[in-house]
Image (spheres, coloured by chain):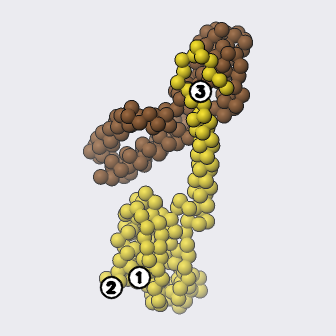
Chain colours: A brown, B yellow
Amino acid sequence: MESVLRGVAIYILVLIVIRISGRRTMAQMTPFDLVLLLIIAETTQQGLLGDDFSITNSAILIVTLFSLDIALSYVKQFFPAVDKFVDGRPTLLIANGKPDEEALQWSRVGMDDVMSAARAQHGLERLEQVKHAILETDGNLSIIPK
Amino acid sequence: MQKPDELELNSDRSFQSKLWRTQRLGWLLMIIVIVAALVGLTGKGGPLASNTLSGTGGTFTYPRVARWQSADELRLKVAGSTGGTATIELGTGLIDALAIERINPEPIRSVATAEGQRLEFEVGPGPEPKEIIISIRPSRPGWVRHALVRPGSGSPVYVSFLVLP
């Protein structure tokens, strides 16, 4: 019983913390973020397993975590409000070449990030060449050139 | 900002604004958690993590907040004297909630009583106070309420503490 409860608690905790920390944190992965992710994985493992290192415990936890993931995908499908909260919606940062300062500030995206995405996706050279910039739900920036 | 008509995008700006504000509230909550942990409200060190009660038999220190399956300590400090024995009685409520891992120094006698169990220790002579450390590990999460402890032979004290999951 304990293993299932531990699995559920950690799943919900990680889901909430990642949601609170914002999309940018996870998408713009620097080498340091990668290390941080590994540390979080290591820390979570302690809470998940407790002092029980048996295969039974691992099996129960793996099954619990996968089941929760499947359940969440169904909940998201049937309740769009949950989907909206868990995955969010894409945000328009630049529309018709006009930057939305408020959106940029709140979502912690700088013009450097926009230009970096513009260069990578379309080889654009100047900010004026960007028509739309959208912050996708996975944290990536999509650039639509003029 | 108005969404351009030609752009097929399932965005919701007012929801997004609310979400951004909720996120900042979440950050505040994260800071509160860190501060609470620093002052000891989540156990394991910090000024508020333990509490000390003074009785006739000396002082008794116990965790105000402990963690499930995580080592902690009960400390009994006996005032200096010409030696003899020091006793502490731990009520059933306490023994049920905690697994006792090690007692330092070892008791010379442990007696089952109506209220729980009484531990008797040999105390050497000298004016300095002596300390007895009982290493514990809470065996289940939740509140431990009004658990009886009788340091020395005086009247019992009742301790309540929280065991975090």
Mark 1 touching mark 2, by CB under 8 A? yes
The residue that mark 2 highlights is B113
Instruction: Give the class, few, some or many, for how many residues have Cα within 10 Å of label 2's Cα (few <14, many ≥20).
Output: few
Chain to which the residue tagged by mark 3 belongs = A
User: At 66% across and 34% down in the image, what residue appears?
Assistant: A106
Q: Quadrant of the C terminus of chain B?
A: bottom left
Residue B47 position within the rendered picture, expressed as x and y whole percent measured from the top left? 61, 65
Residue B127 position within the rendered picture, expressed as x and y whole percent measured from the top left? 59, 86
Q: CA distance from mark 1 to mark 2?
A: 9 Å
User: Are callouts 3 and 1 both on one chain?
Assistant: no
Chain to which the residue tagged by mark 2 belongs = B
Q: CA distance from mark 3 to mark 1?
A: 64 Å
Amino acid at circle 2: Thr
The residue that mark 3 highlights is A91
Specify the quadrant of the image occupied by residue B108: bottom left
User: Are callouts 3 and 2 both on one chain?
Assistant: no
Amino acid at circle 1: Glu
The residue that mark 1 highlights is B89
SS assignment at label 1 = strand
